[in-house]
Amino acid sequence: AKKDLSQAEKANIMISAEAKRVAMELTRKQFSKLIAGIVKKTKAITENVVAAAGVDFKQVTDVVLAGGSTRIPAVRKMLKSLAGKEPQVGINPDEAIALGAAIFAAQKGAEAVGEVTIVDTQGCKVLPPAVDVVDVNSHPLGCLAIDGVGSLERNVVIIPANTPLPAERTDVF
C-alpha cells in the first residue's frame, strides 16, 4: 500500500489475522496517521544529522531523497518544511545511494592517481567535493560494565558517536 499511496489517494489492502483475510480500503490520510510517529522520528534524525554536520538548513543547497520511503508524500512534506525548499526529484531515490557511492569512489580513485577532475558517464567534469567526506560511526559504541562499589550495571561509552573511523581506544575496567 505504501507504494500505491505515494501516487494515489487510496489503495486496496489485504489484512490477514488468525487465519482470516479481510480486504479493505486504506486512504493516504489514514496511512499518514499510522506512520506519523515514524515521520516524527525521521524528522528528529534529520535535524540531528544537519546539526552534527555543523550547518543549518539555510546552508543546504539541495535536498536529495534516498530510499523508497522518501516517495511518501508525508515524508516529502516534512523534508520540505524542514529545509524550506522542495526536495530534488531528478534522482531516483532507489539509486541515490549507489550513485553517491560511485561518485565518491571515482573521486577517491582520482585522488589516488593525482587527477584533479574526473568525468562522469555523460562526459561532464566532476570536481572533487568541496567538503571532506569522513567515515564516522553513527552510534556511540561501548560495553556494559559493573560498578565495583555497588555492583550496578552501567553502559560505558568507549567510542562516542561521530568519531572518525578507524578508531581505537582502551580503558581499564
Image (tube, grey):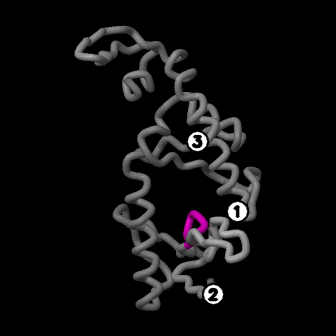
Which disc, if any, is residue 52? 1
Task: Give the residue type that dot 2 points to.
Answer: Val
Q: Is there CB contact under 8 Å for labels 3 and 1? A: no
Task: Give the residue type that dot 1 points to.
Answer: Ala
**Residue 79 location, quadrant:** top right
The mark closer to the camera, 2 or 1, is 2
Q: Which residues are magenta?
A: 136-140
Q: Identify the secondary structure beneath mark 1.
A: helix
Q: Can residue 141 be spotted in the picture?
A: no
Label 3 Cα crowd, 10 Å radius (few <14 / some 14-19 / many 20+): some
* In the foreground, 82 or 144: 144
Q: Name the residue tied to disc 3.
A: 87
As drawn, 165 above or below 77:
below
Distance, label 2 to label 1, CA atoms, is: 29 Å
The residue at the point 53 percent across, 23 percent down is: 34
Q: Quadrant of the C terminus?
A: bottom right
| Residue 120 place in picture, x, y as percent | 39, 67
Q: Identify the secondary structure beneath mark 2.
A: loop
Residue extending furthest toward the left: 19
The residue at the point 65 percent across, 42 percent down is: 43
Task: Give the residue type that dot 3 points to.
Answer: Pro
Q: Is residue 12 left or right of residue 160?
A: left
| Residue 142 place in picture, x, y as percent | 58, 71
Q: Earlier in the sequence, mark 3 or mark 1?
A: 1
- Residue 137 lies within the magenta run: yes
